[in-house]
Image (cartoon, rainbow, N blue to C red):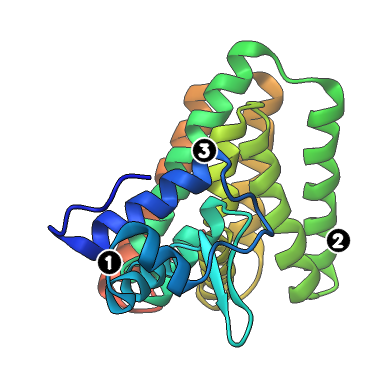
């Protein structure tokens, strides 16, 4: 095993650990060699090695357990983005989050309509839309949030692209919370669910009729409302 050249040492060590994990040398759930063993093998100090491991921990690739050692995590984008959010490097601007959701959904629906949407998938959206209508009638905000969040997730899932949906899923904690905030502020603005329901009906009907321009228009109008609301920080505009 080659020794590590001592330039930007902790970065090089962390890159080595990441490479070994990606190659399958250490698999998810397995414990990597001890600090003493790795430091001796690579010819580096334990301090440099510990700093490198902390880097791997920070992106969710490994986890150090007190008294047990460092273990390989089942790495995914959610843990990576979650760490960026924890460090306040991601998700400070709700307008940016709404923009991301718009891009993911417009792109997903465009692809889905090009490839064809199955009756089963369309029926699932219709069911969720009906659940939202019923929750609004009962003024059941929690049930509404649940159906609304799932409606947007299913819309993104329609394109059958695992990477696109993987990004949406990885950012769940940002997208879902912003969706909830949009709903709450819209309800305050319109004194009820009318604007939100109208927006979702338009989304559903444009998907049902295969009209991507209509869907895009609905999403961009929603984006404009949310940008206006958040930039002014007032209660004068609908955000959903």
Q: Nearer the viewer, mark 1 or mark 3?
A: 1
Do residues under tags 1 and 3 come within 8 Å of each other at their CB atoms?
Answer: no
Element under disc 3: helix
Question: Along the horizontal axis of the image, is 221 left or right of 160?
Answer: left
Residue at image point 68% right, 30% down: 158
Question: Along the horizontal axis of the image, is 184 left or right of 236?
Answer: right
Residue at image point 85% right, 33% down: 123
Quarter of the figure with residue 125: top right
* Distance Cα–Cα, label 3 vs label 2: 51 Å
Quadrant location of the N terminus in the rendered image = top left
| Dot 1 crowding, Cα within 10 Å, few <14, some 14–19, many 20+ | some
Do residues under tags 3 and 2 come within 8 Å of each other at their CB atoms?
Answer: no
Image position of 73 with respect to 143: above or below: above
Image position of 187 with respect to 179: above or below: below
Residue occupied by mark 2: 134
Quarter of the figure with residue 24: top right
Q: Nearer the viewer, mark 1 or mark 2?
A: 1
| Dot 3 crowding, Cα within 10 Å, few <14, some 14–19, many 20+ | few
Residue occupied by mark 1: 44
Residue at image point 25% right, 53% down: 4
* Distance Cα–Cα, label 1 vs label 2: 63 Å
* Distance Cα–Cα, label 1 vs label 3: 22 Å
Image position of 148 with respect to 229: above or below: above
Q: Residue 43: x and y, percent?
A: 29, 62
Element under disc 2: helix
Residue occupied by mark 3: 23
Q: Earlier in the sequence, mark 3 or mark 2?
A: 3
Residue at image point 47% right, 42% down: 219
Q: Nearer the viewer, residue 233 or 69?
A: 69
Q: Residue 135: x and y, percent?
A: 82, 66
């Amino acid at each position: 095993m080659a020794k590590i050249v001592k330039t930007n040492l902790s970065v090089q060590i962390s890159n080595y650990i990441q490479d070994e994990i990606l190659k399958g040398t250490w698999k998810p759930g397995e414990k990597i060699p001890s600090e003493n063993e790795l430091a001796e093998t690579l010819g580096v100090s334990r301090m440099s090695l510990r700093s490198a491991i902390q880097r791997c921990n920070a992106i969710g690739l490994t986890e150090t357990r007190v008294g047990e050692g460092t273990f390989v995590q089942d790495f995914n984008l959610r843990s990576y983005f979650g760490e960026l959010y924890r460090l306040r490097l991601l998700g400070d601007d709700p307008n940016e989050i709404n923009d991301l959701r718009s891009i993911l959904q417009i792109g997903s629906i465009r692809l889905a309509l090009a490839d064809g949407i199955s009756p089963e998938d369309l029926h699932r959206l219709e069911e969720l839309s009906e659940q939202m209508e019923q929750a609004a009638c009962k003024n059941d905000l929690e049930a509404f949030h649940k159906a609304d969040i799932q409606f947007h997730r299913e819309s993104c899932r329609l394109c059958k692209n695992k990477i696109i949906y993987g990004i949406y899923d990885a950012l769940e904690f940002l997208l879902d919370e912003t969706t909830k905030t949009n709903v709450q502020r819209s309800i305050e603005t319109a004194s009820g669910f009318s604007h939100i329901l109208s927006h979702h009906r338009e989304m559903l009907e444009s998907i049902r009729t295969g009209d991507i321009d209509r869907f895009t228009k609905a999403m961009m109008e929603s984006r404009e409302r949310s940008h206006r609301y958040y930039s002014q920080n007032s209660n004068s505009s609908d955000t959903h």
